[in-house]
Image: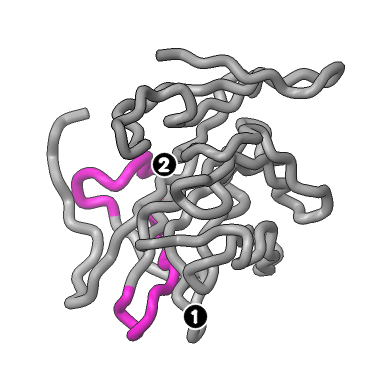
Amino acid sequence: LSGATRRITHTGAEERGVSYAPDGRKLLYASERNGNWDLVEARLKRPQDKGFSGVAPFEEALLVGGPADDFQPLYSPRGDRVAYRGDRSSLRVYDIAAKTSIEVLPRDAVYSYEDDDWRFAWSPDGRWLVTRTGFENTSEIELVDASGREARRNLSLNGFQDRRPQVSADASAVLWLSDRESLRTASGDAVQTDVMAAFLSHNQPPTNDTFS
């Protein structure tokens, strides 16, 4: 890392939500250049270039577009699929090679108050996504099949606020922030946040532990 900065986009529109491809040769972001939020991918042109630093030439291409607002893209661990927010409120997975998109979490599963309040993450094997569901103050953490075939699995199972899930590098646990064990004010508001973990096992249901 040299600290050098390079500008990628040159439009008068807003671009945000950058995701790096695992091989470092592609960037994905949401752009409002066409009047609504679309997913645009920047790709290196020359095979000898390893990254976007310096003057390595690249080209931009529309990956997911249309009349709906699609944003918050996230490459899968192998870089062959992209999870993103479709029409602001549903969780979708786009297969880059097949050029197909499927809904893995319907719009009525999550209530979003603003654009960046809903986070999701891939499992290391690319089979699952972990995501917040429900209303923000009583949100849950769920495991969602990235193929859209299997039923969702609620990992948090409580009426408190659970958010920002991640999967551990060895896929043995799902971690997230929660006010479940928080001290409360006289009005019932949480005053702290803890890190919760659900340890996954093929032989028994997930178990929850708290790390303060």
Q: Residue at x 43, y 64 (%)?
A: 71
Q: Is residue 211 above or below residue 148?
A: above
Q: Which residue is mark 2?
A: 24
Q: Amino acid at mark 2?
A: Gly
Q: Is residue 39 magenta?
A: yes
Q: Is residue 188 above or below residue 138?
A: above
Q: Residue at x 68, y 68 (%)?
A: 100
Do we see residue 14 in this rendering? Answer: yes
Residue 155 position in % (x across, y down): 66, 33
Residue 5 position in % (x across, y down): 14, 45
Marker disc for residue 19: none
Label 1 SS? loop
Part of the protein shown in magenta: 32-56
Residue at far front of view: 186
> Badge 1 local density, few (<14 within 10 Å), some, or many (20+)?
few
Marker disc for residue 68: 1
Quarter the N terminus occupies:
top left
Residue 211 position in % (x across, y down): 46, 13
Sooner in the amino-acid sequence: mark 1 or mark 2: 2
Q: Amino acid at mark 1?
A: Ala
Compared across the picture, whether 146 is left or right of 23 comes to right
